[in-house]
Amino acid sequence: MRPGILLVDDEPSLVRLMERFLSQRGFDVVACLGSGEALEKFAAAPERYGLIIADVNMPGVPGDELALLIAGRSDTIRILLTSGLPFSTDSFPDGVRQRAAFLQKPFLPKMIVEAVDNLLRHS
């Protein structure tokens, strides 16, 4: 069984689209419309998730900070950050940076599947 994906973005239409696309490819996806909801879902069942996909530019807690918070609670979770603006994971601590990747928006559906597969393959 594939590890669960915690999907976090503040754009409802994009969340629905990515959730549907990843689910159709056999992933167990839990979609959230913000960092607060994502932290609650993760805290309730941390063992369920092997990957978080988060938009960097969200109100409240940005996706990169959310990813670091969750990575601090899990030594194995993979991180895929997305944004319409350039971003680098170079400032992340070594142990987290090695399990993180970035995907520039806009991206094609096949690109997110490839990024997810690459991250999970190295788990």
Image: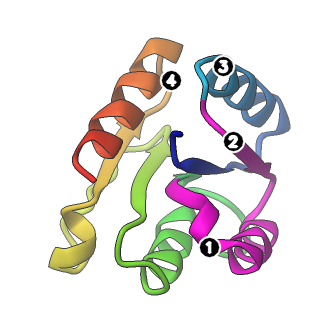
Mark toward the start of the polypeptide (4 vs 1): 1
Mark toward the start of the polypeptide (1 vs 2): 2
State the residue position of label 1. 46
Mark 3 element type: helix
Image quarter for residue 22?
Answer: top right
State the residue position of label 3. 21
- Which x, y percent locates residue 120? 34, 44
Q: Are marks 3 and 2 in contact (CB under 8 Å)?
A: no
State the residue position of label 2. 29
State the residue position of label 4. 106
Name the residue at 62% across, 73% down. Answer: 46
Q: Between marks 3 and 1, how big is the CA–CA gap?
A: 23 Å
- Which x, y percent locates residue 7? 65, 48
Q: Residues within 10 Å of mark 2 (few under 14, many from 20)?
A: many
Q: Residues within 10 Å of mark 4 (few under 14, many from 20)?
A: few
Q: Are marks 3 and 1 in contact (CB under 8 Å)?
A: no
Residue type beneath disc 3: Phe
The answer to whether any part of residue 30 appears in the image is: yes
- Which x, y percent locates residue 74? 44, 78
Q: Between marks 3 and 2, how big is the CA–CA gap?
A: 10 Å
Q: Which residues are magenta?
A: 27-51
Q: Does 46 appear above or below 101?
A: below
Mark 4 element type: loop
- Which of label 4 and label 3 is nearer to you? 3
Q: Are marks 2 and 4 in contact (CB under 8 Å)?
A: no
Name the residue at 49% across, 43% down. Answer: 83
Mark 2 element type: strand
Mark toward the start of the polypeptide (3 vs 2): 3
Depth order, front residue of 42/57: 42
Pick out the residue farthest to the front: 1
Mark toward the start of the polypeptide (2 vs 4): 2
Name the residue at 22% across, 66% down. Answer: 97
